[in-house]
């Protein structure tokens, strides 16, 4: 099978993967970005990133991608670059292995109007990926350059959590148009989010803004908000960094249920408050990319406004 052969190729070339031209690693401190890895037909590539795991980065990336496709009516792709913990196949309800075209490029698996690629589609379910860094870089190169994405308005990249070699290499070599930083309001998560912000600054990737996930929980019985992880922490951090808060996503059971069942909440409950929050985020991302195109020399911060949540006061 073509995908099995692809994985065998990855293993055989592990020792040489560090020299793959598409992912030649260079120090972030050297400044600048390479342009080796351009994806034909893809207008913009954005990273959805977090400084640590467990803040809802992947659920944000999935619902953002689907909202961009359905609400904004754009051609969208979703790359699950979290090689060690791929979750997009479950969240997007896709499990078939990608086909390979005559050019030996993989064809993304599509659902909800979004073209998807993930390492989770190439390995057996529950199989551990005990790979060293060079092999991870090789896999990421094959899931980008080795995929026939077709014409896309935006490719959303669900980044691995953290700020290590894989994250820096993707940022430097994938020609990112911008990055979205996801964090919960608590100080521990925000400290790691700050490291992510600094990483993108060093590799000169414009930051579209911060998303505060799990901003508050509204009791379904009394309708009173509870700020379980703190209140407006991401908003304060954004203000300190000169960034804008481009999304506030409440903590709701429907998000978790949709992720587990493979039906994003923007599909299952398009008129809900949480879906509206994701749709607003999608529109702000589109506005930010448009502003970057109109001001290509402005790599500082996006001037987007998000009104306070109705439960913020």
Image (tube, rainbow, N blue to C red):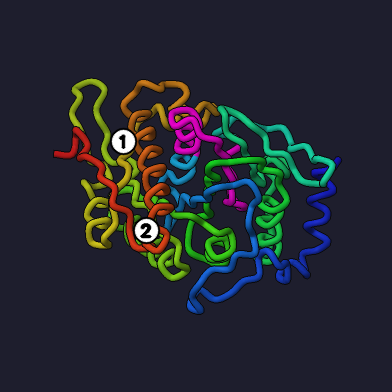
User: Relative to 307, is 19 on the left or the right?
Assistant: right
Residue at screen point 66% across, 70% down: 24
Name the N-terminal-most of marks 2 and 1: 2
**Where is residue 190 shown, x and y percent of the image?**
32, 57
On residue 21, the disc is none
Residue 59 sits above or below residue 172 on the image: above
Q: Which residue is mark 1?
A: 250
**Where is residue 160 shown, x and y percent of the image?**
53, 54
Is the residue under label 1 in contact with that under label 2 (CB below 8 Å)?
no
Q: Is the residue marked by circle 1 packed among few (<14), some (14-19), or many (20+) residues within 10 Å?
A: many
Q: Quadrant of the C terminus?
A: top left
Q: Nearer the viewer, residue 216 or 42?
A: 42
Q: Is residue 67 magenta?
A: yes
Q: Nearer the viewer, residue 120 or 243?
A: 243
Q: Is residue 77 magenta?
A: yes
User: Relative to 69, is 16 on the left or the right?
Assistant: right
The residue range painted magenta reads: 62-89
Residue at screen point 54% across, 34% down: 91
Of helix, strand and loop, which one carries label 2? helix
Residue 229 sits above or below residue 135 on the image: above
Say which quarter of the image contains residue 2: top right
Taking the view exactly as shown, the residue that stands out farthest to the left is: 313
Residue at screen point 45% across, 62% down: 205
Q: Which residue is mark 2?
A: 193
**Where is residue 158 shown, x and y percent of the image?**
52, 48
User: Relative to 269, is 137 on the left or the right?
Assistant: right
Determine the CA span between mark 2 and mark 1.
Answer: 18 Å
User: Relative to 235, is 130 on the left or the right?
Assistant: right
Q: Nearer the viewer, residue 235 or 246?
A: 246
Of helix, strand and loop, which one carries label 1? loop
Say which quarter of the image contains residue 15: bottom right
């Amino acid at each position: 099978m073509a995908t099995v052969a692809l994985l065998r190729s990855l293993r055989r070339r592990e020792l040489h993967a560090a020299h793959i031209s598409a992912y030649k690693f260079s120090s972030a401190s050297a400044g600048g970005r390479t342009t080796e890895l351009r994806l034909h037909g893809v207008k913009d590539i954005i990273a959805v990133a977090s400084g640590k795991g467990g803040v809802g980065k992947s659920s944000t990336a999935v619902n953002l991608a689907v909202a961009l496709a359905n609400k904004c009516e754009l051609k969208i792709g979703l790359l699950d670059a979290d090689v060690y913990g791929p979750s997009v196949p479950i969240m997007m309800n896709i499990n078939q292995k990608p086909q390979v075209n005559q050019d030996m490029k993989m064809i993304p698996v599509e659902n909800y109007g979004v073209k998807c690629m993930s390492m989770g589609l190439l390995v057996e379910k529950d199989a551990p990926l005990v790979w060293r860094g060079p092999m991870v870089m090789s896999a990421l190169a094959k899931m980008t350059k080795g995929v026939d994405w077709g014409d896309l308005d935006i490719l959303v990249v669900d980044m691995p959590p953290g700020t290590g070699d894989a994250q820096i290499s993707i940022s430097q070599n994938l020609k990112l148009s911008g990055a979205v930083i996801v964090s919960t309001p608590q100080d521990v998560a925000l400290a790691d989010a700050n490291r992510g912000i600094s990483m993108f600054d060093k590799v000169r990737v414009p930051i579209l803004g911060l998303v505060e996930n799990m901003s508050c929980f509204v009791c379904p019985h009394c309708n009173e908000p509870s700020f379980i992880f703190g209140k407006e922490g991401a908003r304060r951090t954004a203000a300190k960094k000169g960034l804008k808060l481009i999304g506030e996503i409440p903590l709701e059971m429907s998000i978790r249920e949709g992720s587990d069942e493979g039906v994003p909440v923007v599909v299952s409950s398009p008129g809900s408050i949480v879906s509206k929050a994701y749709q607003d985020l999608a529109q702000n991302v589109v506005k930010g990319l448009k502003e970057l195109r109109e001001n290509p020399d402005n790599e500082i911060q996006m001037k987007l406004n998000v009104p306070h949540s109705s439960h913020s006061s």
